Image: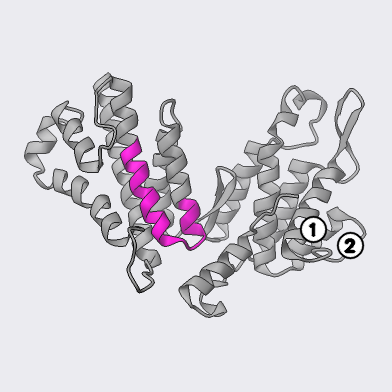
Amino acid sequence: MRITELFSQRRKRQQKEADQPDAALVKYDVPQEMRVNIVQILTDALGPPGRLTHLTGDIEETHTEHWNAIAHIVARNRGQMSIASGRGSYEQVTNAVLYGEDALVLDIVEVAFSRLEDSKRYWEGMRGGHADRVHTSEAIRELNGRFAQWKVGYRFEKDQLLRIDSEFMHEEVTKPALRLLNQKGFAGPENEFLNAHEHFRKGEHRQAVTFSLASFESTMKAILDQRGWLYPVAANAKNLLDICFEKGLIPEYLISHFSSLRNTLESGLPSLRNREGPHGGGAEIKTVPSHVAAYALHLAATNIIFLVECNSDLHK
């Protein structure tokens, strides 16, 4: 079985790396109202135990198999025989969500909704005959709505839980950047941007800074590739920006009226990476604070939005 690092395990590793006590970081605060919502959403999306969901040839899949998988994955990766009391996996998952520790609840949410993402194929051609199940996209939409409603600082996106340090920054910067990178031709920078978030979520702040810059550079390369503008194989951020300015990707009036724009783009993320990224820290272990990594993520998202929208304007 593939080893899965659960949400709570990543947080504990983050505590150890940051040398902070449990009380400083392990505060998930999932209110009872949202616990009830999670059970309701999962039951709607996976179906109650024992009901037939899919039949292809000799293969018969039941709702119970989904609940079994969730309970098994979470328990095994936690080193436990079970996640809660109950006669079957459905009762175990339900009891764990309703009465378990907050970290366990979020472990279950991430595993369960990741499984929903992975099982989207079961929805192809099934909608009419399986109206008892809510579609994956609808379930995820409601989950994120409940996170916002009960002010729990996480969202589920792209098969993972993302920590939301600033709801405004997430709504106004991170989500628009992800939406723009989801367009054709931006798969590379999208993957690096998500990797930056994944490292941030794991408490790997130096790597988060590095992947933030990588996503920014890859966005420029993707735009240059789309337009057939050549650039050196080993081009860094400054080289790529030079070409963007020379080719007119960034409007002239912005360059002339905002003299600091070029300096902001050239010295922001690249300088941060050079100071904080993994270039060999010498004899002492170098720790990047979480607020610095968060700044790198937000700066990368802002820069990406700016460049992709400049590219879109050239098509008009």
Residue 306, quarter of the rendered image? top left
- Residue 167 is situated, as x and y percent measured from the top left of the image, at 44, 55
Q: Earlier in the sequence, mark 1 or mark 2?
A: 2
The kind of secondary structure element at disc 1 is helix
The kind of secondary structure element at disc 2 is loop
- Residue 89 is situated, as x and y percent measured from the top left of the image, at 85, 54
Q: Residue furthest front?
A: 283
- The residue closer to the viewer here, 72 or 49, is 72
Residue 214 on the magenta segment:
yes
Decide: is 155 above or below 230.
below
Disc 1 + disc 2, Cβ < 8 Å:
yes
Residue sitting at 84 percent across and 41 percent down? 63
The reply to whether residue 129 is visible in this rendering is: yes
Query: Label 2, on which residue?
Result: 86
Residue 292, quarter of the rendered image? bottom left
Is residue 254 toward the left or the right of residue 123 in the image? Answer: left
- Residue 165 is situated, as x and y percent measured from the top left of the image, at 44, 60
The reply to whether residue 250 is visible in this rendering is: no
Label 1: how many Cα within 10 Å (few below 14, some 14–19, many 20+): many
Residue sitting at 40 percent across and 38 percent down? 189
- Residue 95 is situated, as x and y percent measured from the top left of the image, at 80, 63
Q: Which residue type does callout 2 highlight?
A: Gly
- The residue closer to the viewer here, 73 or 159, is 73
Residue 178, quarter of the rendered image? top left
In terms of secondary structure, what is the magenta stretch mainly? helix
Query: Label 1, on which residue?
Result: 94
Specify start and end residues of the magenta stretch as a single range. 197-218
